[in-house]
Amino acid sequence: MLTEAEKQTILQDYSRGNLSTRAAITKTGVKDYGDLIIELSRYDLELPRLSASEANIRRATEILQPLLRSHAV
């Protein structure tokens, strides 16, 4: 069983985007994503945001996919 400090550290890592959702659920021992969100709110932590590189990749995909599809045979 985790101490409150250990759980808070895991949730802080998740909130900062340093831990995947699956890893955060597993490490904290919560049942599902909904419980993970509840735990974040208990510690007044925000939902994780995409890193700059992930955001850039997502944006490039949004721009390029329609162009690639329009040229598909």
Image (spheres, rainbow, N blue to C red):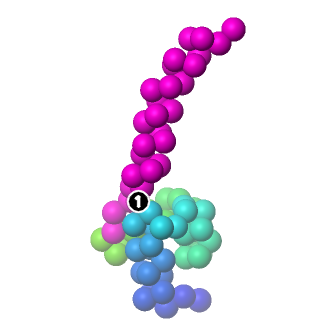
- Can you name the residue that lies furthest to the right here? 73
Quadrant of the frame with the C terminus: top right
Residue at numbered disc 1: 48
Residue 53, above or below 19: above
Q: Mark 1: which secondary structure?
A: loop
On-image quarter of the N terminus: bottom right
Query: Would residue 53 be counted in the magenta stretch?
Result: yes
- Farthest residue to the left: give it: 44
Percent position (x, y) of residue 19?
A: 52, 67
Magenta stretch encompasses residue 15: no
Task: Tell me which secondary structure the magenta stretch mostly adopts.
Answer: helix
Q: Quadrant of residue 70?
A: top right
Count the numbered circles shown: 1
Q: Nearer the viewer, residue 48 or 51?
A: 51
Where does residue 10 sit, x and y in percent of width and height? 48, 77
Residue at 55% x, 62% y is: 20
Local crowd at mark 1 within 10 Å, few (<14), some, or many (≥20)? some
Q: Residue furthest top?
A: 73
Q: Residue at x 60, y 11 (%)?
A: 71
Q: How far from the left and from the top, in percent, is residue 23?
A: 59, 68
Left/right placement of residue 2 relative to residue 9 reads right
Q: Is residue 39 visible?
A: no
Could one spot residue 30 in this view of the protein? yes
Q: Which residue is at the front of the view, 22 or 1?
A: 22
Bounds of the magenta segment:
45-73
Residue type pointed to by label 1: Pro
Is residue 58 placed above or below 46 in the rendered structure? above
Of 72 and 8, nearer the camera is 72
User: Percent from the top left, x then y, of residue 72?
Assistant: 65, 12
What residue sits 38% from the left and 59% below the top?
47
Q: Quadrant of residue 55?
A: top left
